[in-house]
Image: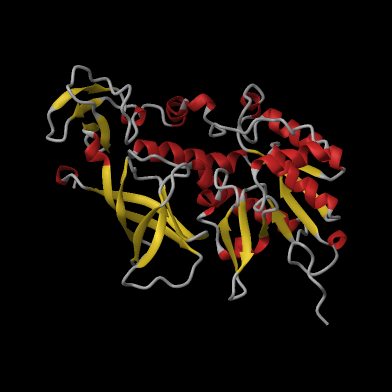
């Protein structure tokens, strides 16, 4: 006789079900842990130390910094659950920070939070959770896990469209989705804070983190200089026809779509960074129209939907976490590569960003943008 399923979709009573909760020290993961504890689950909290603790304790407003480890520990004590701090500093540096620096040097715009989920959190930490005898691992992400008609778990946007984090989880595999749980997916941020106040959590009023955890106040150039000394090679700023307009002291200081701080004055119309050419050490600038992208080439495609028809699949493609998706046709090619034909041009798309695909509210997967096709033939 099959045992009835508990609220996490697992067999057995909550008290007999161990859940590891990834606790960052923020309000979201703290509420996730508290709600599971209230339901009677055997909750174990884990916080990751991801970069130099001596630097971290002097910086607030980022996840996994020194104050955040302290906050996670205080919450765990209040909930009366075991709490462990794991030193993942070396693997985080190798798998996230090194990739971040190399991506900028190649003229890309990386998204390290996705890399962190893809490697450290949803690979290494999941393995640790299993080693601790957990039946599943829960996080404070605003995304919903639902069981489809085929019986497989899938990811669906969180109900709070302003906080939905499915974009950052596109690389999650089916095996990982089967093991993960997201207690806050059906809630909005206001409800989460109200729950924190009701439970009496010390982090109820703690502000959300804004920065990339290892990039204080957006100063990513100093991080790259530290990781890759000598990477800031000078070069020319040129227009679309190759005319030299000025000099720069490192392409890593520029991003696609940038308008201010380019270092060129006196032009009749505003100029934008439209392309970075690391091979020739060039920053290419042009009018805003030159930023419009009609097609993307995507690599390392992760797919959790049904098989993609070779003739193309209509999807909604989300290029940035902060922008709505646009209608597109996805054409899957060999070796986990794909073409994404945008039905509406997107401005300022950069290699290194993620393209994430949706069927309505359901997240199908995504990949890393390898190259773009501009509507301006001079950028082909």
Quadrant occupied by the N terminus:
bottom right
Q: Hey, which residue is sitting farthest top in the picture?
A: 266
Query: Is residue 86 among what the camera can see?
Result: no
Q: Is residue 90 above or below residue 59?
A: below
Whether residue 204 appears in this view of the structure is yes
Q: Residue 150: x percent and y percent?
A: 58, 76
At 45% from the left and 29% from the top, the residue drawn is 220
In the displayed structure image, the side of residue 8 where residue 95 appears, left or right:
left
In the image, taking residue 95 as reference, residue 16 lies left or right, namely right
Q: Nearer the viewer, residue 305 or 171?
A: 305
**Quarter of the image where one finds residue 206:** top right
The reply, left or right, for residue 11 in relation to residue 323 is right
In the image, 347 versus 275, the foreground residue is 347
x and y percentages locating residue 166 in the rendered image: 54, 52
Picture quadrant where residue 154 is located: bottom right
- Residue 380 image offset from top left, x and y in percent: 18, 47
Q: Is residue 361 above or below residue 310?
A: above
What's the residue at 61%, 61% (across, down)? 177
- In x, y percent, where is residue 298? 36, 55
Q: Which image quadrant for residue 351?
A: top left
Q: Residue at x 36, y 50 (%)?
A: 369
What count of labels does the image hold? 0
């Amino acid at each position: 006789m099959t045992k009835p399923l508990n609220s996490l979709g697992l067999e057995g009573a909550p008290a007999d079900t161990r859940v590891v909760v990834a606790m960052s020290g923020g309000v979201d993961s703290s509420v996730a842990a508290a709600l599971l504890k209230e339901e009677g689950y055997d909750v174990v909290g884990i916080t990751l130390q991801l970069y130099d603790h001596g630097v971290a304790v002097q910086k607030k407003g980022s996840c996994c910094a020194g104050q955040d480890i302290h906050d996670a520990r205080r919450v765990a004590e209040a909930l009366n659950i075991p709490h462990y701090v794991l030193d993942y500093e070396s693997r985080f540096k190798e798998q996230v920070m090194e990739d971040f620096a190399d991506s900028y040097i190649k003229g890309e715009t990386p998204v390290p939070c996705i890399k962190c989920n893809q490697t450290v959190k949803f690979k290494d930490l999941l393995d640790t959770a299993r080693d601790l005898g957990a039946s599943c691992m829960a996080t404070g992400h605003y995304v919903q896990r639902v069981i489809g008609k085929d019986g497989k778990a899938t990811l669906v946007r969180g109900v709070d469209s302003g906080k939905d984090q499915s974009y950052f989880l596109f690389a999650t595999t089916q095996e990982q989705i089967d093991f993960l749980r997201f207690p806050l997916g059906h809630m909005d941020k206001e409800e989460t804070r109200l729950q924190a106040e009701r439970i009496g959590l010390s982090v109820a009023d703690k502000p959300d983190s804004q920065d990339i955890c290892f990039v204080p106040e957006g100063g990513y150039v100093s991080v790259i200089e530290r990781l890759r000394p000598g990477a800031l090679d000078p070069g020319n700023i040129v227009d679309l026809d190759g005319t030299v307009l000025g000099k720069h002291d490192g392409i890593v200081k520029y991003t696609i779509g940038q308008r201010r701080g380019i270092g060129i004055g006196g032009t009749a119309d505003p100029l934008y960074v439209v392309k970075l050419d690391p091979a020739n050490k060039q920053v290419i600038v042009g009018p805003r129209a030159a930023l419009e992208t009609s097609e993307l080439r995507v690599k390392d495609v992760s797919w959790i939907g049904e098989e993609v028809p070779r003739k193309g699949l209509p999807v909604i493609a989300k290029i940035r976490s902060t922008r709505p998706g646009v209608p597109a046709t996805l054409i899957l090619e060999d070796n986990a590569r794909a073409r994404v034909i945008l039905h509406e041009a997107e401005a300022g798309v950069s290699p290194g960003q993620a393209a994430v695909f949706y069927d309505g509210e359901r997240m199908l997967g995504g990949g890393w943008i390898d190259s773009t096709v501009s509507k301006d033939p001079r950028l082909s």
